[in-house]
Amino acid sequence: MGKVKYLLKRISRMNYSGFFDMINLVHDKTGKGKLFLFADMVHCGLKFQAGYVDYDLFEMYNMTEKERATVITRGINNSLIKKYNDPEKMKIFHNKIDFNRHFSKYLKRDWLEVKADDFEGFKEFAGKHARFVAKPVDLACGQGIEIVDTTGKDLREVFEGLLAKSQRLLEEPVVQCKEIAAIHPDSVNTLRVVTLKGHVVVAFLRIGNKHFHVDNFNHEGLAAPVDIHDGIIKYKALKKSGELYTEHPITGVPIVGFKIPRWDEVVKFCEDAAREIPEVGYIGWDVCVMPDDICFIEANEFPGHDIYGLPPHRDKNEGLLPVFQEALKD
């Protein structure tokens, strides 16, 4: 019944202009007939809960029915979130300050909640950390994050500016290990490690680009899948616009073959944290590997599915759903 409700909701809210645009796009790429593509997209939506973006993204037009059944589509991803993530407990992850409070032992750095009536608290923090990261509490995808340097500045003006931009969370900057920093030194290049019921099921190294200070996929960043068994990157890094890179386009540092330092520790770190709030069983953790430790930057209670098992990142023409299903057996 839940699947039927989901499909009816998607049909009622579907962007039909986008749907037909996608038919034209896939037709131009493949030469397949538009009537066939129309019927096949509808079929994949009904049988595999795949949106028309999924159909193109995962190249489902080149997959057999058996292969299509291995793809984590939007509908399947949403069903995992609905089944394993309690809505009330998810709020802890949505609000960055609540997250920092609950996972303070995993942060390994100072942080401060900016309050309008606590300028003295801000002064004390800025006295210890003249340079810090300022974050809005409720935005995602790197939006609104700034590196602030108070050296030689009027602290009252800085304080008022933070409040005006709703940058209510300040954090001591993290220092990443030299091996990962070398790939793109201008950004902290984090790991997105996804856990399901306390097990690591997928991981990516997110790499900054073009000297941006964030590593986000939506800011020209690159994403490269990490083999969860040995911590080695075995596929080319992908840019959102589709380009693939064996080495970083700015620094020339090799990406394929790179081994994540302290990988076994990263896995244990994430799996231990995942059991802190068992009511939220499906989480995407943003992890920084530091020179002598590991820490969380933040976490996502609604992990996106759109980088799981993309065509450039698979040997067999299969998705990652079997890996997720294995984790659910425990």
Image (cartoon, rainbow, N blue to C red):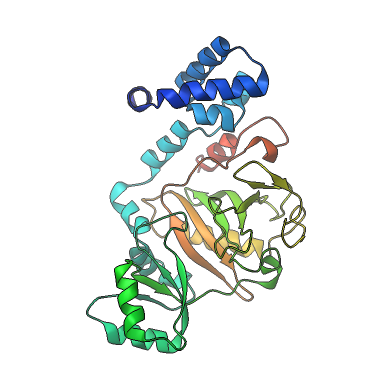
Task: Tell me residue 169's x, y (percent).
Answer: 37, 70
Provide residue 61's location: percent of width, then percent of height: 61, 21
Q: Residue at x 63, y 58 (%)?
A: 209
Horizontally, residue 317 falls left or right of residue 116, namely right
Expressed as whole percent of the image width and height from the top left, the position of residue 68 reads 59, 25
Foreground residue among 295 and 143: 143
Res. 213 image quadrant? bottom right
How many numbered badges does the structure rendering display? 0
Residue at (67% x, 66% y) in the render: 180
Front position in the image: 157 or 323: 157
In the depicted view, which residue is nearer to us: 63 or 219? Answer: 219
Q: Is residue 64 above or below residue 286?
A: above
Point out residue 164 in the picture as x, y percentages from the top left corner.
30, 69
Q: At 27% across and 75% down in the image, what residue appears?
A: 115
Can I make out residue 43 in this image? yes
Q: Residue furthest left?
A: 117
Q: Quadrant of the N terminus?
A: top left
Question: Which residue is drawn at the image coordinates 42% and 62% (left, top)?
Answer: 144
In this rendering, position of residue 292 left or right of residue 258: left
Q: In the figure, 80 relative to 45: above or below?
A: below
Q: Is residue 196 above or below residue 25?
A: below
Please indicate, yes or no, whether residue 70 appears anywhere in the rendered image: no
Q: Is residue 187 left or right of residue 282?
A: right
